[in-house]
Image (tube, rainbow, N blue to C red):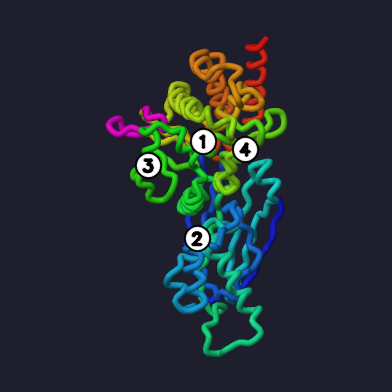
């Protein structure tokens, strides 16, 4: 990971700050800053990284086209109609109307292989790319008519947040960009991309999964197709061979998994989708029994007894157990699938009932978390060693079963 500095003029800047107190795990206090910068479009840097947005924006869809229309025809209205861009950086300072930002920058390889998260555009990637595209168009025109609106004069609202831990960026990105994955998979749904998944789900389960915005078959859905894509990725031994690569991208890069979805990559796994859902929910129900006081664990959300969490399978749980705890266990279970994903070495019902398998992996995951000082759940979920250890443990258990 490298650090890089960006500097650019601003029209005005405002700052708010607070201090996060130390955590029980020994983490030091951190200063969080939230800056608002008002910047002329022409003064925006043209090479800001998309981390932790983690997806190349599609500017051909309706919303980006409307953004471009405003820039071309009414640039003066842009700041009123657009939320602007949100960045996460290591530091931000403004002096003499010049903003200076320091960012951690990761390569694509670091992101995909190690689950690293760099700084950059947290939200507003589509706005940023539309701005760059429209400004490039303007510069390339051979003649300039003074009566034609100039997009370069548009004012862009840029929010800059500092003091965020790298291990928190995946969760913050998912929360901040919730609308973008929905729009992406809505577009894919228009092309019947998700038909193979829809055909597998029974009616009651289908009502809990949205495949597009405002899905009439799932109007009150708590889950979306991204949850299914991530689940399938966790078991994909073709994309993530057991002895070479772990599917950490299922936790860190949901948007990329959706954008690069190919049914052919998951053909052998689709018949097992309901089994994967059942295994996930069994793990969720196992964790509170080993955690002791689950409501006190970082990332775990306790639900009222009268209004429990409805899991994807339809069962109820008092607790939401976040992916950092469930995903590494599920990824390890792919060791019990045959290499081509066509069948199981050990049947799912055996994995659930025999305490040597899934329950043992849950216990080991919880033990690793406690030994790590009960650090941030997000940081724990990105720890490659956790995923690797669990998968190797599962592979040894499979060999014992087969022999």
Residue that carries the numbered disc 1 in the rendered image:
323
Residue that carries the numbered disc 4 in the rendered image:
265
Position of residue 349 relative to residue 2, above or below, is: above
Mark toward the start of the polypeptide (3 vs 1): 3
Quick check: is 310 in the magenta stretch?
yes
How packed is label 2: few (under 14 Cα within 10 Å), some, or many (20 or more)?
A: some
Quadrant in the picture for residue 398: top right
Mark 4 and mark 1: Cα distance apart in space:
23 Å
Mark 3 and mark 2: Cα distance apart in space:
33 Å
User: Does the residue at mark 3 contact the one at mark 1 (Cβ under 8 Å)?
Assistant: no
Q: Which residues are magenta?
A: 303-315
Front tag of 3 and 4: 4
**Where residue 305 sits in the image (x, y, percent)?**
30, 30
Secondary structure category for the residue under label 2: strand
Front tag of 2 and 4: 4
**Residue at the top extreme, as displayed:** 403
Residue 170 can be seen, yes or no: yes
Secondary structure category for the residue under label 3: loop
**Residue at the bottom extreme, as displayed:** 146
Mark toward the start of the polypeptide (2 vs 4): 2
Mark toward the start of the polypeptide (3 vs 2): 2
Residue drawn at (51%, 50%) of the image: 191
Residue that carries the numbered disc 3 in the rendered image:
221
**Where residue 382 sits in the image (x, y, percent)?**
60, 38
């Amino acid at each position: 990971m490298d650090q890089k500095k960006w500097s650019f003029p601003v029209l005005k800047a405002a700052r708010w700050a607070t201090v996060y107190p130390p955590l029980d795990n020994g983490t030091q206090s951190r200063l969080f800053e939230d800056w608002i910068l008002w910047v002329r479009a022409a003064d925006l840097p043209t090479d800001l990284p998309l981390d932790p947005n983690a997806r190349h924006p599609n500017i051909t869809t309706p919303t980006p086209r409307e953004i471009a229309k405003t820039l071309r025809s009414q640039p003066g209205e842009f700041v009123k109609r657009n939320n602007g861009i949100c960045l996460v950086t290591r530091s931000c300072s403004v002096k003499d109307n010049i903003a200076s930002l320091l960012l951690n920058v990761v390569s694509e390889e670091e992101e995909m292989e190690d689950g690293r998260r760099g700084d950059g555009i947290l939200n507003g990637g589509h706005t940023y790319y539309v701005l760059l595209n429209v400004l490039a168009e303007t510069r390339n025109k051979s003649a300039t008519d003074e009566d034609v609106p100039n997009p370069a004069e548009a004012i862009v609202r840029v929010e800059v947040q500092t003091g965020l831990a790298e291990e928190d960026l995946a969760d913050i990105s998912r929360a901040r960009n919730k609308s973008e994955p929905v729009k992406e998979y809505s577009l894919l749904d228009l092309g019947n991309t998700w038909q193979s998944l829809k055909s597998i789900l029974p009616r009651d389960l289908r009502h809990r999964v949205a495949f597009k915005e405002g899905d009439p078959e799932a109007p009150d859905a708590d889950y979306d197709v991204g949850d299914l894509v991530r689940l399938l990725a966790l078991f994909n031994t073709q994309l993530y061979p057991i002895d070479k690569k772990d599917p950490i991208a299922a936790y860190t890069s949901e948007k990329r998994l959706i954008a690069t979805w190919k049914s052919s990559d998951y053909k052998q796994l689709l018949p097992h989708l309901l089994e994967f859902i059942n295994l996930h929910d069994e793990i969720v129900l196992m964790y509170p029994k080993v955690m002791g006081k689950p409501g006190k664990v970082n990332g775990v959300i306790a639900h009222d007894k009268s209004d429990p969490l409805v899991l994807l399978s339809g069962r109820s749980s008092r607790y939401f157990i976040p992916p950092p705890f469930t995903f590494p266990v599920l990824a390890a279970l792919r060791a019990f699938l045959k290499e081509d994903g066509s069948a199981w070495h050990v049947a799912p019902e055996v994995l659930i009932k025999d305490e040597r398998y899934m329950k043992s992996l849950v216990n080991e995951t919880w033990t690793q978390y406690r030994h790590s000082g009960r650090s941030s759940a997000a940081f724990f979920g990105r720890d490659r060693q956790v995923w690797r250890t669990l998968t190797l443990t599962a592979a040894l258990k499979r060999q014992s079963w087969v022999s």
